[in-house]
Image (tube, helix red, strand yellow):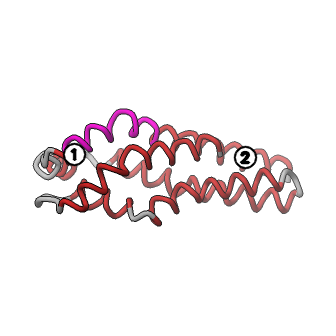
C-alpha cells in the first residue's frame, strides 16, 4: 500500500504541475492576446477560424490532462485514507484539485470562454466584457491553486 500511496502522490503532483503550467502560461502569454482580439472584435474572424483549421492534438491533450488531474487528486485522497497516511494533506490536495475546475464552472467562465473562442459570429458585448474581465485573473487563480496543490 505504501508504494501505491507514493505512486498516487507522484501522479497527482505531476498532473497538478502540468495543468498549473498550462494555466499560468496561458495567463501570461495567450489570454492577454485573446482579450485584445475580443476587445477589438477580431476573435471571430481570427482565432475562431484558426481554431477550426488547426490540429486538435493540443486541445485534446489539455482536456485529457485536465480531466485526469482531479481524478489523480481524488485517487491520492482515497489511497491516503486507506493507508492512513497524511490524510490532512490529502484533503488539502483533493480540495485544490477540484477547486480550480469548480471555479471555472461556477463563475460561468467556462461557457463564456467556449462561446468567445468558438464563435464565428459577432460576440455579444456582455459576453465579451465578461471574457475580457475574467480571462487573465481566472487563469492565474487556477494556475496558483494547482501550483499550491
Q: Quadrant of residue 1?
A: bottom right
Residue 15 shows up from this direction: no
Which numbered marker is on residue 25? none
Q: Secondary structure at mark 1?
A: loop
Neighbourhood count class around disc 2 (C-alpha, 10 Å): few under 14, some 14–19, many 20 upward = many
* Magenta residue check for 36: yes
Q: Secondary structure at mark 2?
A: helix
Q: Residue at x 36, y 48 (%)?
A: 135
| Residue 136 located left or right of residue 15 | left
Which span of residues is magenta-colored?
23-37
Residue 100 position within the rendered picture, expressed as x and y whole percent measured from the top left: 53, 54
Residue nearest the viewer, comparing 85 with 143: 143
Which numbered marker is on residue 9? 2
Q: Residue at x 39, y 65 (%)?
A: 108
Residue nearest the viewer, comparing 13 with 32: 32
Contact check, label 1 and label 2, Cβ < 8 Å: no
Q: Which residue is mark 1?
A: 54
Residue 140 position within the rendered picture, expressed as x and y whole percent measured from the top left: 47, 42
**Label 1 to label 2, Cα distance in Å?**
35 Å
* Majority secondary structure in the magenta region: helix
Does residue 30 lie above or below 138 as drawn?
above
Q: Quadrant of residue 111?
A: bottom left
Residue 138 position within the rendered picture, expressed as x and y whole percent measured from the top left: 44, 49
| Residue 22 located left or right of residue 14 | left
Residue found at the far right of this picture = 84
Residue 112 position within the rendered picture, expressed as x and y whole percent measured from the top left: 31, 61
* Magenta residue check for 138: no
Neighbourhood count class around disc 1 (C-alpha, 10 Å): few under 14, some 14–19, many 20 upward = few
Amino acid at each position: 500500500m505504501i508504494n501505491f500511496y507514493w505512486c498516487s502522490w507522484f501522479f497527482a503532483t505531476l498532473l497538478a504541475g502540468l495543468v498549473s503550467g498550462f494555466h499560468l502560461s496561458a495567463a501570461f502569454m495567450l489570454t492577454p492576446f485573446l482579450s485584445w482580439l475580443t476587445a477589438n472584435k477580431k476573435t471571430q474572424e481570427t482565432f475562431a477560424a484558426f481554431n477550426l483549421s488547426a490540429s486538435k492534438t493540443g486541445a485534446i491533450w489539455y482536456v485529457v490532462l485536465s480531466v485526469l488531474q482531479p481524478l489523480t487528486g481524488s485517487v491520492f485522497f482515497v489511497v491516503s485514507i486507506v493507508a492512513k497516511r497524511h490524510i490532512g494533506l490529502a484533503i488539502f490536495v483533493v480540495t485544490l484539485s477540484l477547486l480550480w475546475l469548480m471555479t471555472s464552472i461556477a463563475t460561468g467562465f467556462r461557457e463564456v470562454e467556449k462561446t468567445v473562442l468558438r464563435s464565428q459570429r459577432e460576440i455579444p458585448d456582455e459576453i465579451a466584457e465578461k471574457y475580457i474581465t475574467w480571462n487573465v485573473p481566472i487563469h492565474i487563480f487556477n494556475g496558483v491553486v494547482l501550483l499550491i496543490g
